[in-house]
Image: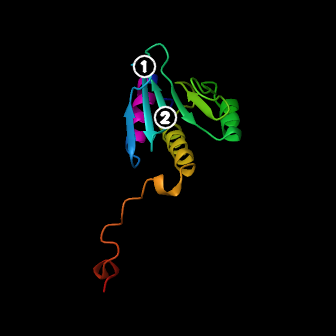
Amino acid sequence: MSTAGDRLQDTARNAALALPDVSHGRPFTPRLDVYKVADKVFLIVTDDPDEQIITVKCEPEHARALQRGYASITPGRYLDKRHWISLGPGRGITKRLINDAVEHSYDLVVDGLPVHRQPKPPPLRGAGTAQSFGF
């Protein structure tokens, strides 16, 4: 089932906020909701009712494949069109595709950060204690 524009945007926002160490704001214009990890952008949500899109980072080859497969995936608005794509509502744009695109973008940005700036995964509950290993 395809996702309408407002659901596309809400799905992207929720996916981004579920990831570690994400901040968001509107540093450029009131119509662009920007999500960052370690001060690096990985998601832009356009709050224009006439243009309900999200823009995410994407590996160039994967971006081209997505653009060939989905009419509503285009080269990224606002950023380098080789490394960013925009997703709009349309045929085949599902919640899973949106979540995957946001998570992939986040991972690309995190992987490009120096190790000391990368978010730390949350510790396992009870990890590191003798009780957690059944002793």
Task: Compare residues 117 and 10 and report the one nearer the observer.
Answer: 117
Q: Residue furthest bottom?
A: 135
What's the amino acid at mark 2? Answer: Leu
Residue 43, numbered circle: 2
Give neighbour class at mark 2: few <14, some 14-19, many 20+ (Cα, 10 Å): many
Q: Which-is-in-front pick, marks 1 and 2?
A: 1
Q: Which residues are magenta?
A: 6-16
What's the amino acid at mark 1? Answer: Thr
22 left or right of 53 in image: left
- Provide the residue designation for mark 1: 29
Label 1 and label 2: CA atoms lie apart by 15 Å
33 left or right of 101 in image: left
Task: Compare residues 96 and 63 and report the one nearer the observer.
Answer: 63
Task: Compare residues 110 and 1 and report the one nearer the observer.
Answer: 110
113 left or right of 122 in image: right
58 over 55 or under it: above or below = below
Q: Quadrant of residue 33?
A: top left
Q: Please identify the dominant SS of the magenta region.
A: helix
- At mark 2, the secondary structure is strand
Residue 6 lies, in percent from the top left, at 41, 24
55 over 135 or under it: above or below = above
Q: Residue furthest top?
A: 50
Task: Compare residues 28 and 86 and report the one nearer the observer.
Answer: 28
- At mark 1, the secondary structure is loop
Residue 99 lies, in percent from the top left, at 48, 41
Q: Residue at x 40, y 43 (%)?
A: 22
Using the rendered image of the protein, determine whether residue 111 is visible from the camera's viewpoint: yes
Q: Earlier in the sequence, mark 1 or mark 2?
A: 1
Q: Quadrant of residue 32?
A: top left
